[in-house]
């Protein structure tokens, strides 16, 4: 799946808060304060539809809080936003999900003492058997149950969890739980999938397959917004990057543009984000005159001066 | 040596009190075992149901179905009152509120000012009259050996256990339905369920009302073979129900039946054995010490149970394996 070029996404000069040609979320003046701390203070931001947008920024930048606000898990002090043109501010979390905007959590929330299959079935919508009175009469919900079971089975196969279907979710590894949470979110056929650090704690091979799944979502016409600290991941799959720092949107743009932005390097990436850590700390030998060698001698000299 | 106490202990397995405890525990299983609601006031639900039943039949003179209906409505209303302010909060708040509310009920009905309605500290007598009037079983004695029952005693056992089985069936059907899946999801992680588009508050309320109504009906059943005494509904009643639940298995529908039977049989059997020991001089106890000792035994048995079989008698081992 090719990346969507910047020109197809924006409707104006690239800058924080730039309007999009086809936004799925438009947020205005969203702020959230915890006592004296302003966690989120976003003046204006638009999330492009049918694209993969990465939300990056240093720890404590307010990314997860912003996620929580958009999905109704937290209430803002000020602000409004629309989802597919309809107002969605201060709507409770379950209604947000029903509108087609589902999320996953930074700390994976698999339902441990339920089977993997039951986890999946719970993600489905329009199951009449979830009504207490209808639940008593199996014929009323059986056909829908069969339908969603088929969908669950095919999703589990796609995420390579089908052999685990009848195991408790608690028996899965951390990475498999991430997969399960994502697969479960897809049961409702959402329009927007919001992933909070989908790659955290996932091994490289699994990361590759997760990346593939995220690209698939875009191909199927969904929109993805994700928080991620792994810049390789961001560079590889994101069409658009929004950078937050101290609660504000400080930059946005295509991945390569944003990552060479001095302000972003300063606030988040650090000057040597391309350099291998091992070469900096002296654990690895490097040839004289290479970038990391220069950086290391700079650091050592600075340390000497300090003494 | 008189070994009749063994028969009497076995008779406890089908006594109406055992049925009432089983029914109340089924309610608790819905709350705690399946939805994860910490209800420490199931005794309060039983009290509300019992009083609603007794007052409707004794003070208002209405027929039996209305008395049962009153027990259902009153305990459902009690669940709503407790649930509305607490179910949006963390689960510990429900625990605090339910334990306090149960005590409020027990102490309020005892006030002398309410004696005309609730009977004050002495409670109410004769609530079973309309119930026994409907007894279709012809007079006589039924049973074998020491275990013989009058027609009324048999009638309350039949109806009590019928009620328990109906409750089991309803809960069983609900738990294996998609509704049951949602409440089990809430037990595991309510935010996850919320993120999947389920109205968590509403489901928790439904579960609280369902379990509360079962508690209320158990309260009505509880006073059929005896008079209604406010002090029967103390905090210890709730903890007996928890004991029964853990005995049978907290996430099983039929565990409460097994748990309640075992609880009462063991309690009665140990009473018989202890009094045998005391009378024959084998145990250095007085007959007044003998009563409390039984509960010490129950406590010790419960401690052993949680250590060696934490899933209860009917529970699945694998559930405990992962819940560390």
Image (cartoon, coloured by chain):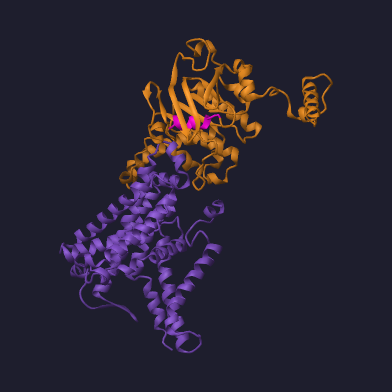
Chain colours: A orange, B purple
Q: Residue B14: where, in percent of width, then height?
A: 35, 70
Asked whether A104 or B162 is in front, the reply is: A104
Q: State whether residue B155 is above or below residue A40.
A: below
For the point 50% across and 56% down, the residue is B316
Q: Residue B226: where, in percent of width, then height?
A: 28, 72
Image quadrant for the N terminus of chain B? bottom left
Toward which corner of the image does residue B61 lie, by quadrant? bottom left
Residue A31 within the magenta-colored segment of the rendering: no
Extent of the magenta region: A61-71
Q: State whether residue B57 is above or below residue B208.
A: below
List the single residue furthest toward the left.
B61
Residue B205 visible in image: no
Residue A75 visible in image: yes
For the point 50% across and 25% down, the residue is A224
Q: State whether residue B140 is above or below residue B33.
A: below
Residue A66 within the magenta-colored segment of the rendering: yes
Asked whether B139 or B167 is in front, the reply is: B167
Q: State whether residue A85 is above or below residue A199.
A: above
Q: Residue B296: where, in percent of width, then height?
A: 48, 73
List the single residue furthest toward the right.
A288
How many marks on residues? 0
Instruction: Tell me which secondary structure the magenta stretch mostly adopts.
Output: helix
Is residue B306 rendered to the left or right of residue B245? right
Is residue A231 rendered to the left or right of residue A182? right
Q: Residue A181: where, in percent of width, then height?
A: 52, 36
């Amino acid at each position: 799946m090719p990346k969507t070029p910047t020109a197809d996404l924006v409707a104006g000069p690239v800058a924080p808060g730039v309007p999009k040609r086809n936004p799925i979320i438009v947020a205005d003046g969203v702020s959230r304060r915890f006592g004296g701390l302003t966690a989120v203070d976003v003046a204006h931001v638009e999330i492009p539809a049918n694209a993969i947008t990465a939300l990056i920024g240093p720890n404590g930048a307010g990314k997860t809080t912003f996620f929580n606000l958009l999905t109704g898990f937290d209430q803002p002090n000020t602000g409004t936003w629309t989802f597919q043109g309809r107002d969605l501010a201060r709507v409770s979390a379950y209604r947000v999900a029903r509108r087609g905007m589902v999320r996953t959590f930074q700390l994976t929330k698999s339902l441990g003492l339920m089977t993997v299959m039951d986890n999946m079935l719970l993600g489905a919508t329009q199951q009449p058997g979830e009504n207490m009175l209808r639940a008593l009469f199996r014929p009323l919900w059986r056909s829908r149950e069969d339908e969603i079971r088929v969908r669950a089975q095919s999703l589990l196969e796609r995420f390579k969890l089908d052999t685990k279907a009848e195991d408790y979710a608690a028996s899965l590894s951390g990475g498999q739980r991430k997969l399960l949470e994502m697969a479960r979110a897809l049961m409702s056929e959402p329009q927007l999938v919001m992933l909070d650090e989908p790659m955290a704690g996932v091994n490289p091979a699994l990361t590759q397959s997760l990346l593939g799944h995220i690209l698939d979502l875009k191909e199927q016409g969904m929109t993805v917004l994700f928080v991620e600290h792994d810049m390789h991941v961001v560079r590889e799959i994101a069409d658009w990057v929004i950078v937050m720092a101290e609660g504000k949107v400080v930059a946005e743009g295509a991945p390569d543009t944003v990552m060479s932005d001095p302000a972003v390097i300063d606030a988040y990436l650090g000057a040597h984000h391309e350099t291998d850590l091992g070469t900096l700390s002296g654990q690895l030998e490097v040839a004289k005159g290479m970038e990391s060698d220069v950086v290391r001698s700079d650091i050592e000299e600075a340390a000497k001066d300090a003494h | 040596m008189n070994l009749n106490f063994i028969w009497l202990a076995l008779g406890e397995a089908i006594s109406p009190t055992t049925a009432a405890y089983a029914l109340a525990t089924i309610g608790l299983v819905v709350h705690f075992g399946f939805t994860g609601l910490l209800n420490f006031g199931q005794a309060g639900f039983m009290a509300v149901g019992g009083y609603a039943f007794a007052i409707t039949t004794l003070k208002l003179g209405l027929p039996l179905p209305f008395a049962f209906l009153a027990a259902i409505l009153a305990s459902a209303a009690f669940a709503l009152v407790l649930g509305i302010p607490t179910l949006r909060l963390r689960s510990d708040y429900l625990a605090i509120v339910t334990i306090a509310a149960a005590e409020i009920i027990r102490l309020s009905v005892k006030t002398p000012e309410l004696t005309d309605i609730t009977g004050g500290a002495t409670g109410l007598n004769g609530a079973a009259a309309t119930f026994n009037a409907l007894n279709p079983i012809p007079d006589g004695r039924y049973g074998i050996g020491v275990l013989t029952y009058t027609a009324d005693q048999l009638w309350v056992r039949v109806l009590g256990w019928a009620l328990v089985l109906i409750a089991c069936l309803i809960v069983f059907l609900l738990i294996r339905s998609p509704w049951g899946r949602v409440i089990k999801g809430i037990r595991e992680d309510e935010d996850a369920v919320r993120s999947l588009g389920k109205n968590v508050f509403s489901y928790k309320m439904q579960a609280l009302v369902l379990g509360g109504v079962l508690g209320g009906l158990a309260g009505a059943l509880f006073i059929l073979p005896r008079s209604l005494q406010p002090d029967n509904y103390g905090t210890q009643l709730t903890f007996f129900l928890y004991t029964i639940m853990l005995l049978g298995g907290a996430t099983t529908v039929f565990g409460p039946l097994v748990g309640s039977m075992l609880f009462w049989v063991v309690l009665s059997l140990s009473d018989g054995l202890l009094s045998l020991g005391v009378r024959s001089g084998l145990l250095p106890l007085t007959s007044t010490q003998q009563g409390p000792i039984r509960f010490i035994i129950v406590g010790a048995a419960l401690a052993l149970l949680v250590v060696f079989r934490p899933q209860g008698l009917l529970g699945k081992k694998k559930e405990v394996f992962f819940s560390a």
